[in-house]
Image (cartoon, grey):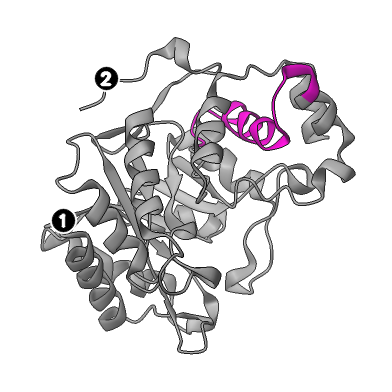
Amino acid sequence: MNEPARSEDFAHAPATLRLGDLEVRRLGYGAMRLPGKDVWGEPDDPDRVRKLLRHAVELGINFIDTAWFYGPFVANRLIFEALHPYPRDLVIATKLGGKRLPDKSWAPAARPEELRRGAEDDLRTLHLERLDVVHLRFMSSSGVPLMESLDALLALQAEGKIRHLALSCVDARQVEAALARTPIVAVQNMFSVAGGGGMLATLSHAEVEAPEAVLDLCTRRGIAYLPFFPLAVGNVSQQKPALSAIASRHGASVSQIALAWLVSRSPVILPIPGTSSLAHLKENWDARRIALSPQEMEAIGR
């Protein structure tokens, strides 16, 4: 088991974050990049991927975000092959509510029977008896009300198959409605330096709400906020010259500054950058040591 991260390892406190009764270091790993192209099929070099997962744990990362439909089933299988028996402090989060079609497209899968099947697939492919954290991804195109899907996961939780519940692609009103029914330990929405903080993922095709509203709610309630696509910087360095200038000042990459900005933005943010490169994995992990000044934070978020 890795030693707990020391506060001095992170430029911005806290160094860890609680998900219910679980404690994780405040920079995780997203497994979406583990399968092949288009998040489909086997990677070009499965041995390299397994080595990368083992190295992530060796670095100190103890939170991995995955889903049965990454591959499908490929990411979960690689995690099992690389890390089982799992370190005692490793937390594996999964997500339900989506699926892949034969043409590689993404589709909703939010009916109670689909959610149950997905949970069973996660349990089977990860070789777990209980899932630590399960995000319910909302897609309005499913036609299934969020509360109906949430009730299905509550039933699985009552059976001991899920430890903690979380949400994904939701607005603040939906988070409040869920909290009125059950504890929620995390919310996973799109959020990055892009556009002054990114925007709510439009997978639900619903009206886009300012992401800060959800983040502020999570910060007040002590709910972990997992920004997916945290390094969706793309051409942002051209749109935001401050990023490149600040990166140069710190002797860091633009991606590292983007991660440091997220960790500094709120004490509940838990970035989960994904990569298939060992070098990028180490670079992402080292971003936790970058201390941004208030002036730099303002310049990036402007």
Look at the magenta stretch and give its main secondary structure: helix
- Where residue 216 appears, as percent x and y from the top left, is 58, 39
Q: Residue at x 70, y 31 (%)?
A: 253
Q: Which residues are magenta?
A: 248-269
The residue wearing badge 1 is 130
- Where residue 1 appears, as percent x and y from the top left, is 20, 28
Depicted 224 relative to depicted 96: above or below: above
Pick the front one: 57 or 26 = 57
Mark positioned earlier in the residue sequence (1 or 2): 2
Pick the front one: 148 or 108 = 108
Q: Is residue 91 magenta?
A: no
Depicted 39 relative to depicted 15: above or below: below
Few, some or many C-alpha atoms within 10 Å of disc 1 (few <14, some 14-19, many ≥20)?
Answer: some
Image position of 76 (left or right of 201) = left
Q: Where residue 3 is drawn, which disc sits there? A: 2
Image position of 261 (left or right of 70) = right
